[in-house]
Amino acid sequence: GVKKWFLKNKIQNVHELSWWEKASFKVNDMTIDIHAVPAQHFSGRGIFDRNMTSWCGFVAKFNCLDKNLSKNVYFSGDTGYNSKDFKLIGECFNKIDLSLIPIGAYHPRKFMKAVHINPKEAVKIHKDINSIFSIGMHWQTFNLSDEGPLQPPYDLFLALKEFKVNTDSFLAIDIGEYVNW
């Protein structure tokens, strides 16, 4: 629902997707399929455009043709939690090699629950989508909510322990830090 804005601003190379649609690209010896997948949030930037466009996450499937190698990367976007959509993503893609899942901006729950997950729900998504390795995002950049700036990684650690998930499989890395996967 936002392609017209890009075109109006002379940005022409735009692929607009609804949930479960995909766009495919070929780059050298690799094909990349970008799948739009459900997320639970709202949309709008002005007074009169609330929920007039879609919101979503993405699964990028990278297929290296020469090496018969395939990797799936999931970007959840901002989202609230519901078991239906995330379990369906897990069923559709079988396994996700790398996930970027939010762990911050979750307090107060009464206000944030519908649109932002907390670390416990992030671990549920990690499990629902069959993620092999996840990185916590959406924390320590802007002060958007009431939890302390270092609370999300601590709460993530506690949630991983509670759900008996290996703490090396879901990391909250600092800004500028990187990992090889």
Image (cartoon, helix red, strand yellow):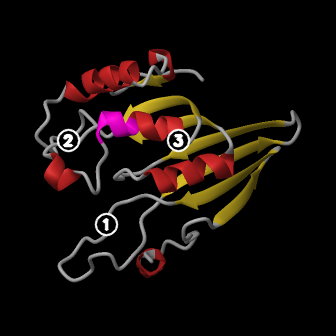
How dense is the environment of label 1, judged by Cα within 10 Å: few (below 14), some, or many (20 and up)?
some
In the shown orientation, is residue 162 left or right of residue 23? left
Reading the image, the residue beneath label 2 is 142
In the shown orientation, is residue 13 left or right of residue 63? left
Q: Residue at x 49, y 36 (%)?
A: 126
Residue 119 locus on image (x, y percent): 32, 34
Q: Earlier in the sequence, mark 2 or mark 1?
A: 1
Q: Residue at x 26, y 76 (%)?
A: 50
Q: CA distance from mark 2 to mark 3?
A: 28 Å
Reading the image, the residue beneath label 3 is 128
Reading the image, the residue beneath label 1 is 42
How dense is the environment of label 2, judged by Cα within 10 Å: few (below 14), some, or many (20 and up)?
few
Residue 122 locus on image (x, y percent): 39, 38
In front: mark 2 or mark 1?
Answer: 1
Q: Which quadrant would residue 137 be assigned to in this image?
A: top left
- Residue toward you, 40 or 16: 40
Q: Which quadrant would residue 133 be assigned to in this image?
A: top right
Q: Is residue 176 above or below residue 39?
A: above
